[in-house]
Amino acid sequence: MHKEIPTTKICKSVIAALAMSGLLAGLSGCQEGPAERAGKKIDKTIEKGEQQLDKAGDKIREDVKGE
């Protein structure tokens, strides 16, 4: 005699475990650490530098056209 485990009980347990794992992973991803803040500061600095280079390029083009 073989006792069979109901598959619905196993499925519910697996689904519950996966759901909890997903929630925990999602919550941990929401926190911003020092590396993320530093990365954002670097991105902003690079964007400002690009804007300054664009302005300098525009100024050079204007000066070349004016001569």
Image (tube, rainbow, N blue to C red):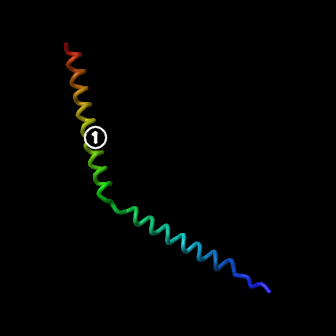
Q: Secondary structure at mark 1?
A: helix
**x, y (%) of residue 36?**
32, 54
* Quadrant holding the N terminus: bottom right
Residue placed farthest to the top in the image? 67
* Horizontal side of residue 29 vs 22, given as left or right: left
Q: Compared with residue 32, is residue 58 higher up or lower down, i.e. above or below?
A: above
Q: Quadrant of residue 45?
A: top left
Q: Compared with residue 64, is residue 50 higher up or lower down, i.e. above or below?
A: below
Give the residue pinned by disc 1: 46
**x, y (%) of residue 57?**
25, 26
Which residue is found at the position 49% from the left and 69% from the top? Answer: 21
**x, y (%) of residue 23?**
46, 69
Pick the front one: 67 or 14: 14
Q: Compared with residue 25, is residue 39 higher up or lower down, i.e. above or below?
A: above
**x, y (%) of residue 24?**
44, 69
Q: Compared with residue 36, is residue 47 higher up or lower down, i.e. above or below?
A: above
Residue placed farthest to the right in the image? 1
Binning the other alpha carbons within 10 Å of mark 1 as few (below 14), some (14 to 19) or many (20 upward) gives few
Q: Quadrant of residue 43?
A: top left
Under mark 1, the amino acid is: Ile
Which residue is found at the position 22% from the left and 22% from the top? Answer: 60
* Quadrant holding the C terminus: top left
Which residue is found at the position 64% from the left and 80% from the top? Answer: 9
Q: How many marks?
A: 1
* Horizontal side of residue 3 vs 65, given as left or right: right
Which residue is found at the position 74% from the left and 85% from the top? Answer: 3
* Horizontal side of residue 11 vs 56, given as left or right: right
Residue placed farthest to the front in the image? 1
